[in-house]
Amino acid sequence: MSEYINVGAYFDDGTSKARVASIAALRRHLRDNPGDVEFDNTAMHMGPGDARYRASEIPAGPRFQVCGPDPYTNRKWWATVELVGGKPKVTS
């Protein structure tokens, strides 16, 4: 059985923080700057910001179900992110 964690995604380069606009942008950020991608848990039993994960530090095992660009107000795309070969990748 697979574990899924429902999340939104931010790109935070230290000077600005914004929601990831598209699956293509998520792929690019994960490839080029995984330490600047942050996932925030959207589970109802946790408030926004209660659980955050840097893409470069996500645990092996669970799959991150990303909804974007904003999981609360603008659900235009969905993607699955998981570790592949020790690196975070969009797998679907």
Image (tube, rainbow, N blue to C red):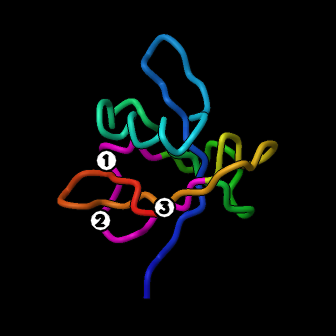
Sequence-first disc among 3 and 2: 2
Residue drawn 74% across the image and 49% down it: 75
Q: What residue does disc 1 label?
A: 57
Q: Are marks 3 and 2 in contact (CB under 8 Å)?
A: no
Q: CA distance from mark 3 to mark 1?
A: 16 Å
Q: Which amino acid, mark 2?
A: Ala
Give the camera-side residue of 49 and 88. Answer: 88
Query: Quick one: label 2, few (<14), some, or many (20+) residues within 10 Å?
Result: few
Above or below, 60 against 70 in this view is below
Q: Position of residue 49 (x, y in %)?
A: 62, 42
Per the image, label 1 sits on a secondary structure element best described as helix
Residue drawn 54% across the image and 15% down it: 16
Q: Position of residue 89 (x, y in %)?
A: 34, 53
Is residue 56 shown in magenta?
yes
Residue drawn 32% across the image and 30% down it: 33
Give the camera-side residue of 87 and 79. Answer: 79
Sequence-first disc among 3 and 1: 1
Labelled disc at residue 60: 2
Q: Which amino acid, mark 1?
A: Glu
Residue drawn 41% across the image and 69% down it: 62
Q: Position of residue 26 (x, y in %)?
A: 47, 40
Labelled disc at residue 41: none
Q: Position of residue 21 (x, y in %)?
A: 61, 34
What span is in magenta? 53-66
27 left or right of 87 in image? right
Q: What residue does disc 3 label?
A: 80
